Amino acid sequence: MQKLSSHVYFIEGERKGKYPFCNCLFIKDSKSSLIDTGAGEMIKDVKADFVFNSHWHEDHITYNKHFNKICIHEQDSKALESYEEFKRRYGLSDELLSHFIYFEFSKVNVEFKDKDQFKLGKTMVKVIHTPGHSKGHCCFLIDDDNVKVIYLGDIDLTSFGPWYGCLDCNLDDFIESINKVMRIVESENVEIAVSSHREIVRGVENIVGSLKNYLEKIAERENKILNLLINERKIEDLIGKGIIYKRFGEPKEAFEHFEKIMIKQHLDRLMKIGMIDKTYDKYVKL
């Protein structure tokens, strides 16, 4: 563990937090808590009174079963408890979904919502609802003796950029959530940002800069789409053209499914702002 402030510790996930692992935070105060449990086997040795999950995805809930009290946003709780809801949000067959289930579903003890606060002693944790990556995705603003730490979850600041490939993802919400976090970082003078899959970022200016770069990935993807839509194309013609993935992971069919969901959200957004048109099942740049 790496100490970030008086009571807050960074737990780097295996493979430096790369999927299927994630970075976690441990808060050791009068009450102890973990934020997410996907760091790897070592997380099982942490003694925590309860867990805050940022969202329902498998790499964040991997070791939930080893802890007694699980807390998650009210809009993600069903996917944490139910295979059927987990499957519905992924939109995959049982066979394809099996590649993403390496955990046990767990009971949710506490459903929280935006702006809820949890006092753990001298440390205060505030919930920031940041939908987009999932319907109930949340960041957590931690005030530890006036040192502000933010856990960004899967607003993860990676060079890949935002991921919105499940059926409960929403691109417009994701954009607003990133902007919301930037405003909070500046207004609250947040000095330390921890994301699920990248190294720690320190300093308000650096955190905001990283968020802006991360947001820019969405514009880059839309420019790729617009360049391809000089001629009419079906959505299927856009899959595998490097808009989202440089190359597909395995199982390929699942990653093609994710990319199609993400591209469809871009097409809907570009239609809404009047940059493309659609005739039957074909799209073209205006």
Image (cartoon, rainbow, N blue to C red):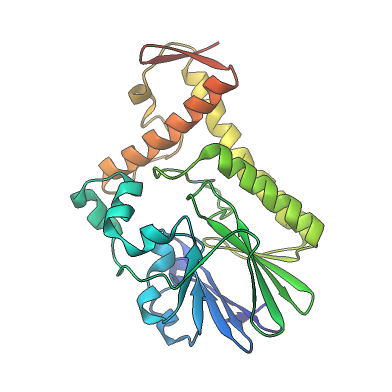
**Image quarter (top left, top right, bottom left or bottom right) of the C terminus:** top right
Position of residue 164 relative to residue 27, above or below, is above
**Do we see residue 5 in this rendering?**
no
**Image quarter (top left, top right, bottom left or bottom right) of the N terminus:** bottom right
Indicate the quadrant where residue 32 lies: bottom right
Lateral position of residue 96 relative to residue 222, left or right: left
Lateral position of residue 127 relative to residue 135, left or right: right
Q: Residue furthest left?
A: 95
- In the rendered image, residue 221, in percent from the top left (x then y), is placed at 53, 32
Indicate the quadrant where residue 114 lies: bottom right
Residue at point 32%, 38% (across, down): 256
Residue at point 64%, 47% (across, down): 178
- In the rendered image, residue 203, in percent from the top left (x then y), is placed at 77, 62
Residue at point 42%, 39% (across, down): 246
Residue at point 27%, 59% (across, down): 83
Position of residue 63 relative to residue 210, above or below, is below
- In the rendered image, residue 186, in percent from the top left (x then y), is placed at 79, 55
